[in-house]
Amino acid sequence: MRAASDASSTSSTFKHGRHRSVSQTPSVHVPEDLPALPDEVIVPGLERSDTVIRRADEAWENRAVALATKEMAGDSGVVHRMGRLSVADSGLARQRSPSVGTPEMDVNIQTAIDLHEKGDLVESTRMFGCLADPNGDNNALAQVLYGLALRHGWGIQPNPDEAIAYLRMAASNSAVIENEAKKANTKLATRSRKAGAGGAKGELTLAIFELANCFRFGWGVDKDIVAAKQYYETAAHLGDPDAMLEVGWCLLTGSGCKKDKFMAAQFYRMAEKAGKEEVGQSWIWKEKYDPTPNNMEKHRRRA
């Protein structure tokens, strides 16, 4: 019952505080009509009931899908000029259905990863490119990895424009697969339904995180720290530990949002619980940063 009580307190405390998750500063990369977030899913680290956890996962996944769809639809022509590739005009329409992998494809991706780790960047990137081809395998994970290769010049001439185009394609394809998986899962009994079963949540999360990096550092796109913070936060709530750290940094420094040390502590705590610890972060465990109803009410008043 404690979890339900915490969730109720959070909802009351942050009833009018959704701006803490969604910046009021406009960004062309963040849709104005993002799916609404239930009040109790905004603050990480609370003990929650299974029902609230499911609501939170669904809410943040819907937000990731909205961001992915916005990115691909808003790509101003870069995707249509990707050399040998011919991508359909619609951001969600492909000449082949998007894929997260067959057993054979998974083996090929792992082979490419192994080659990359051994230093054979040329061959690994060539394989990523083949698997990423929207007119071929159209694999979402390979599109992320090929996008990173293009961004950082791993065995290929760096091309930031094509890099972000592939990352956008990966996000969009993953969003399509997630939506299809959701539709399929709604036909299952609630008790046997498995959130994200057969979907591409991992690929979607990774693509959203890497797009956040593009916005933060201006890789293939003008710098947009507001979008970076929003994308990092979405990836963090979908379970990416690196994104959790980045949201903490954004909140601590006021990058793309107002400075908020209390909320920064929550994301740093979430990252540590996920295995991402940083030196010099012991302050985050002070009692005044515990997400208790009393502390959150004090935080709301200060804000």
Image (cartoon, grey):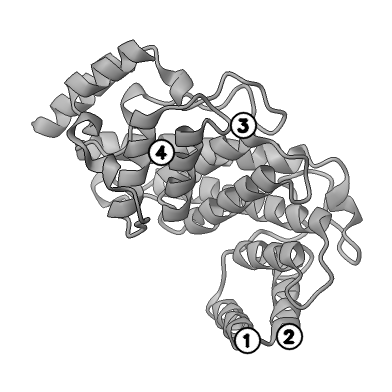
Q: What element carries label 3?
A: helix
Say which residue appears at 82% left-offset and 53% top-offset: 161
Residue 301 drawn above or below residue 108? above
Taking the image as shown, residue 273 lies to the left or right of residue 112, namely left
Q: What element carries label 1?
A: helix
**Mark 2 highlights which residue?**
123
How far apart, in angstroms, are the residues tagged by discs 4 and 3? 23 Å
Say which residue appears at 58% left-offset and 83% top-offset: 117
Which of the two residues, 211 or 129, is positioned nearer the viewer here? 211
Count neighbours of disc 1 (C-alpha within 10 A) and say few if under 14, some if 14 to 19, many if 20 or more.
some
Measuring from the top left, give residue 111's x and y in whole percent.
59, 85
Q: Of callouts 3 and 2, which one flags the residue occurring earlier in the amino acid sequence?
A: 2
Q: Of callouts 2 and 4, which one flags the residue occurring earlier in the amino acid sequence?
A: 4
Q: Of callouts 3 and 1, which one flags the residue occurring earlier in the amino acid sequence?
A: 1
One can see residue 204 in this view: yes
Inspect the image, locate mark 2, and give the three-letter code of the amino acid beneath it.
Answer: Glu
Inspect the image, locate mark 1, and give the three-letter code of the amino acid beneath it.
Answer: Leu
Measuring from the top left, give residue 128's x and y in whole percent.
69, 74
On residue 115, which mark appears? 1
How far apart, in angstroms, are the residues tagged by discs 1 and 4? 36 Å
**Mark 4 highlights which residue?**
58
Give the number of the mark in front: 1 or 4: 1
